[in-house]
Image (tube, grey):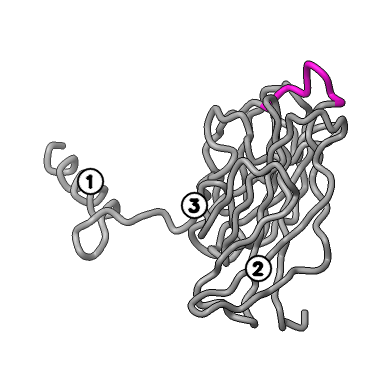
Amino acid sequence: MRRYFLLFGGFFYFLLIGCDGSFEADEFAINLKYPEPNSNCEKGTLSSNGISIPFQWEVQGEISSFELILNDEVVSINPRTLDDGTLRFDLQVDYNSSYSWKIVSNEADSKVQEFRTPSGEPNDNSVPLAVTFDERVIVTPQSNTTNIEVRWTGGNRENDGTLRYDAYWSTSEAISPENNDGEEQNLTNPIVTFSIPNFDTNTYYYILVVARDSENAAYSILKYCQLCED
């Protein structure tokens, strides 16, 4: 009996290790990126009816179909792929609510994470709105850089003087206040000028404008390329 036990134990150990003696990683995996655990969804886009959350995750292996499980309810999704390979799906949810979420597929399931949405109170009328960008972007070449000027309208329903704008630029579609190539913060006028080094007329640039007051914020992104045809 002892000899049989030793042989079985050795066979099980062999199955767990790779050919080089190290443990093999899972072939398929799903890793959640946003909302971050226990976050308050500062990247969500606010509206009068709720907040649109940019759910984001990364995958390991060839996984092509996904479902979002939100508070134990199955949501059919069709995510888009960002420049860095991250998958994203936007979904509007309620204000002032707690959620648990995970992404599942036939090959793998992610871990479950929780987040909470901000409140639209005390006055929904004071919640900033997403801005509307002007179609014209002014491009001015300089000696070592190129200036681009972007204008927009909106952002504040009540025009009570509390609204401020934070503006960011990046060549990455995954632009955010934490991930960008340049920023101008605490603007009081709906205009920003960025000095961009090595400006490429055939490259897409992303401009993020955050309209915020003391309670909430709304996010708007402009995708701009000077000579791109699509």
Quadrant where the C terminus lies? Answer: bottom right
Task: Pick whichever of labels 1 and 3 is earlier in the sequence.
Answer: 1
Out of 7 and 176, give the one closest to the viewer: 176
Most common secondary structure along the magenta stretch: loop
Determine the CA span between mark 1 and mark 3. Answer: 29 Å
* Amino acid type at mark 1: Phe
The local crowd at label 3, few if under 14, some if 14 to 19, many if 20 or more residues have their Cα within 10 Å, is some
Q: Position of residue 113 (x, y in %)?
A: 56, 32
The reply to whether discs 2 and 3 touch (Cβ–Cβ < 8 Å) is no
Secondary structure of the residue carrying numbered label 1: helix
State the image quarter where residue 194 is shown.
bottom right
- Badge 3 marks a residue whose secondary structure is strand
Locate the N terminus by quadrant: top left
Residue at image coords 78%, 16%:
122
Q: Earlier in the sequence, mark 2 or mark 1?
A: 1
Range covered by the magenta-colored residues:
117-125
Give the residue pinned by disc 1: 8
Give the residue type at disc 2: Ile
Residue 122 magenta: yes
Residue 163 picture quarter: top right
The answer to whether 170 appears left or right of 190 in the picture is left
The reply to whether the C-beta atoms of the residues labelled 1 and 3 are less than 8 Å apart is: no
Judging depth in this view, the residue of 23 and 220 nearest the camera is 220
Dot 1 alpha-carbon crowd within 10 angstroms: few under 14, some 14 to 19, many 20 or more: few
* Alpha carbon distance from label 2 to label 1: 69 Å
Front residue (pair 120, 117): 120
